[in-house]
Amino acid sequence: MKNDVLLKLLEDLPDDLIESAAEPEQSRRPVFLRYAVPAIAACMVIVLAAVIYPKLRTVTPERTEESSFTTAVTTAQPAETVITGNVPETVQTGTEAAPDPVHIVTAPAYPAVTGKRVTAAPGETLPENDPQNNSEEGGGPDAPGTPQDNGTKPQENAATRPGARTTSPSSTARQRTYTTAKPVTTRPVPQTAAATTRVRPATEAPATRAQSLQTDTPSYYTQASPVTDYPGEEGPEKHGDTQTPTAPTTPTEQRIPCPFSTDRPGTGSDNVPTPGGTNNPPPMGAEPLSAELRGNRLTVHTDGPCSDAMIAYLALRDHRLIIEIYYDRNDRSDLAEQEFTVYLPWEHANEVWGIESVCYEVDNVDEFDHSDEEVTLIVFS
Amino acid sequence: MYGALCRSVARNILGTNEDAEECFDDALLAAWNAIPPAHPQSLRAYILRLVHNHAVNRWNASKAQKRGGSQLPAALDELSEVLASRDNIEDENERREMLEGITQFLRGLPKQQRDLFVRRYWYAATVSELSALFNMTENHVKVTLSRIRKRLQNYLRKEGLL
């Protein structure tokens, strides 16, 4: 058919077809929608992943009902964070394997002098080997198998027993007795469970320190007191406590050779006190400590220049493990955070109840200017 | 209101903007003269038809001058291949039958294909324009038009018009 004939033929197409073709129907979605919808969906996925995924990763395990055994109430410790994981009942009996409880104690740097009291739930009955009761007794039985267990039993304070546990178990654990490497048997405990800089005094009465070691002084932790006041030198009546002072006993601290490191020389009785008192400001690099206990693995985090650090001291006393972390502050080669992991020398992780406190303590030692960190654990034997 | 559409039709048929503009002006003048007695149901279709007729007349007049740029010959060539067996339609009745057959065929098509067909062979739109207008690729437009022509041929044969 010729074009002109065909053209004439098409000229007479109905108006509705021409009108309809003036507004054609698009077969597909617009290009904008074709690409915008997947782009928006991808952005939403990315945003959700960026927001939700980190939260999912940081979700802590669901905390089940706390047993009275592990109930801890922390008071007057504004800057301290205590996270106590659940310890199942099987921990007490030791008949079943319990999941690793996680204990994280963060010790801030140099808070105000406050106290810390750890109490149990009302109506709680403590086991015979409760270290807190032992501490009230002025030094309870040592851990089994410890060579220096002299078996001394201080007189029991009837005013504080039995039942309600009202005093801090950490009160005695704040002090230490060196048996071999550190003839200065006791070390002044920081007034707070948080980080407190203390300088080991040059003259210290071992007997007095030992007495204070075995005597629970809860008021020491509940009210502010000068740093120069040593817990053992304060009578319970001084702070209104009804406990009777206990007789001085031989410190029951037992030193456990740490298989992971060696003692650093110069720590111990040869420490030179810092002039100007014991309330000196902390040295540079004294940063908060935090420790995390997972099973028998203790991880201590330091935020300061802690190079050449090592776990130098493990002491078990009154069911408490005291760990010192020595490091040389003169070494500025590594200013990054460091983390030390200690596998506690117990066969059963259940023996470790939790971290009682993380203390910061300075040993101003000769030219090395060593410092140590102290982590005190509550241990069940 | 319909200036762009009418100009595009005239431009596709004539191939130049100047001719399309003149054609559009002529169409408007014709509409001005014709509408008082006439009452078109669809003003847009009426004006489009005026523009189309004026453009075809102008294209026929300029065909001898070999002026290129028009899309109409290419479109008509595509369609004439389908209707090649029918060289000429002398009788008015045959022309009407053929027109009726094509109209019926187009009414039976989906709207998209029908619009595509009308746009291509009445509006004389280019393949690229159809591609943009219908959000289809040019190849898809060509294939679709080819299938419609094939179906039209089959339909007209079935109706005995070819």
Image (cartoon, coloured by chain):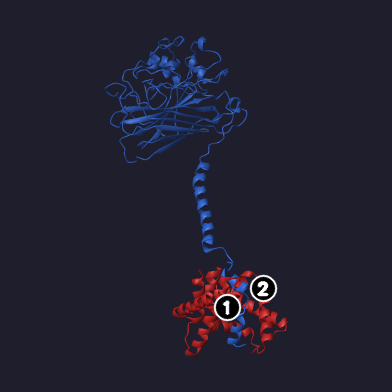
Residue B50 vs A115, above or below: the answer is below
Coordinates of residue B60 in the picture (x, y in percent) = 52, 86
* Chain A color in figure: blue
* Contact? badges 2 and 1 (CB < 8 Å): no
Quarter placement of the C terminus of chain B: bottom right
- Residue beneath the point at 55% across and 81% down: B53
The residue beneath circle 1 is: B122
The residue beneath circle 2 is: B107
Which of the 4 image quarters holds residue A306?
A: top left
Q: Nearer the viewer, residue A62 or A178?
A: A62
Identified by mark 1, the residue type is: Trp
Q: Is residue A84 visible?
A: yes
Say which element carries label 2.
helix
In the image, farthest residue toward the front: B37
The chain that hosts pointer 2 is: B
Residue B136 vs B100, above or below: the answer is above
Identified by mark 2, the residue type is: Arg
Coordinates of residue A118 in the picture (x, y in percent) = 49, 21
The chain that hosts pointer 1 is: B
- Residue beneath the point at 50% across and 44% down: A54
Coordinates of residue A73 in the picture (x, y in percent) = 50, 23
Q: Nearer the viewer, residue A27 or A132?
A: A27
